[in-house]
Image (cartoon, grey):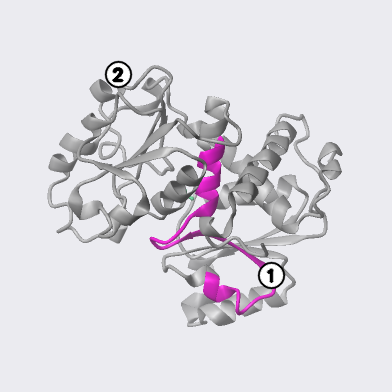
Amino acid sequence: MKHLLSSHDLSVDEIVGILDVADHMAEINTRSLPKVPALRGKTIASVFFEDSTRTRLSFETAAKRLSADVMTFMASSSSLNKGESLRDTIETLSAMGVDAMVIRHKSSGVPLTMTQWTDAVVINAGDGWHQHPTQGLLDAYTVTREFGTKDSLSGRSIAIVGDIKHSRVARSNIDIFRRLGAHVVVVAPPALLPKNIESWGVEVRNTIDDVVGEVDALYMLRMQLERMDSSIVPKLTEYCALYSLTPERAARMGSGAILMHPGPINRGVELIVDPTDVPGSRILKQVTNGVNVRMAVLFTLLGSGATTVLQQGGES
Ligand code: CP
C-alpha cells in the first residue's frame, strides 16, 4: 500500500493493524511530551481545496507529534486564484520535496488523479461523495475500543442516519464497519439514499424511531446542504420529524449505546438535542481518536515499520 485513497484499499488485516498502531499513538498522546521521532526528516503537506477543521488540524497535529515537518497549503490564498491549475499546483508542491500529501477536494477522484503528478504518498482526506477513509478508520477505532472488541464488530449493530447519498463518510464507514463484522442499518428518506443501496449490504429502515432503541451505535450524518439542491429536501421540518435526534429520542437509546457524528454538526437539523446532554455521546472522543488514528496512518505509510521508535521520547 503506497497511498490511502479509499477504504477499499485496505484489507481487514491492514485495518486491524492500523487500529493496533493507533493504540500505541493513544499512549504517546497521554505523555507529558506527546512526541516521538518516528517521522523525523519527513515533510507532510496538507493540501485542502475544501474547508475542514477536524481532518486538517488532526493530520497536522499527528504529523507534528511524529516529528515530521508540516507544510500547509491554503487554497483560498494560493496562486489558484491567479489561474494556476490543479496539476501545476501539485507539481509545484511536489518539487519542494514532500513525502506525503494529505488532500481534500470537492471532486471525487482527485486524490487518485494526483498520484500521476507526484511521487509523494497521497492520503485522501475526503473527495466529493466518494471516500473519507481516515474518518472510517477513526470511527472503527472509536466503536471497537468502546465495546472492547479490538479486531471485530461482530454482533454489533450500527445505524447510520441521514444524508447517505451525498456522504463520503457513509461510504467509507459502511465498508469498514461491515468488513469488521457489524450489522449496518441505514435510515434516510428515499431521496437521500443512493439508487443502488440494495448492493451495499445494509438494512434500510424508514425512520430514526425504527432503530433508536435497538442499535449499539447511532451514527448521525451531517446534512450535506452544500451538495444537494433544495428540491431534494423541500422542507427541513418534515425531515427533522422523521430523522433528527431529539431529547426524547436520545432518552430511548439503548443502555450502553453510543452516539456518533463526524462533525461539523448542523445543530437544529440532524441533532436537535445538545450532544453534551447525551451520556452516550462519543462525538468529541471521535475527534481525539482522529489524532491517534491519523498518527497511525502516517506512521504506517511513511515510517520504517519499527514500533520501537514509538517508545522513544521526542525532541522538546
Ligand atoms: N469529519 C470531518 O471531515 O470534519 P472536517 O470537515 O471538519 O474535517
Type of amino acid under label 2:
Ala
Q: Is residue 181 located in the magenta-colored stretch of the structure?
A: no
The residues tagged by marks 1 and 2 sit, at their Cα atoms, a distance apart of 48 Å
User: Residue 35's spot in the image, x, y percent?
Assistant: 77, 41
Which quadrant is the C terminus positioned in? top right
Q: Is residue 144 left or right of residue 108?
A: right
Q: Which residue lies under the disc numbered 2?
A: 251
Q: Secondary structure at mark 1?
A: loop
Q: Secondary structure at mark 2?
A: helix
Which quadrant is the N terminus positioned in? bottom right
Relative to 3, residue 83 above or below: below
User: Residue 87's spot in the image, x, y percent?
Assistant: 55, 80
Foreground residue, 242 or 224?
A: 242
Type of amino acid under label 1:
Ala
Residue at x 48% of width, y 55% of height = 132
Residue 36 in sight from this viewpoint: yes
Q: Earlier in the sequence, mark 1 or mark 2?
A: 1
Provide the residue span drawn in magenta: 112-141
Foreground residue, 76 or 17?
A: 17
Residue 315 in sight from this viewpoint: no
User: Residue 257's spot in the image, x, y percent?
Assistant: 41, 24
User: Residue 115's spot in the image, x, y percent?
Assistant: 60, 74
Image quarter of residue 230: bottom left
Relative to 291, residue 211 above or below: above
Residue at x 52% of width, y 55% of height = 7
Q: Is residue 130 located in the magenta-colored stretch of the structure?
A: yes
Q: Which residue lies under the disc numbered 1?
A: 120
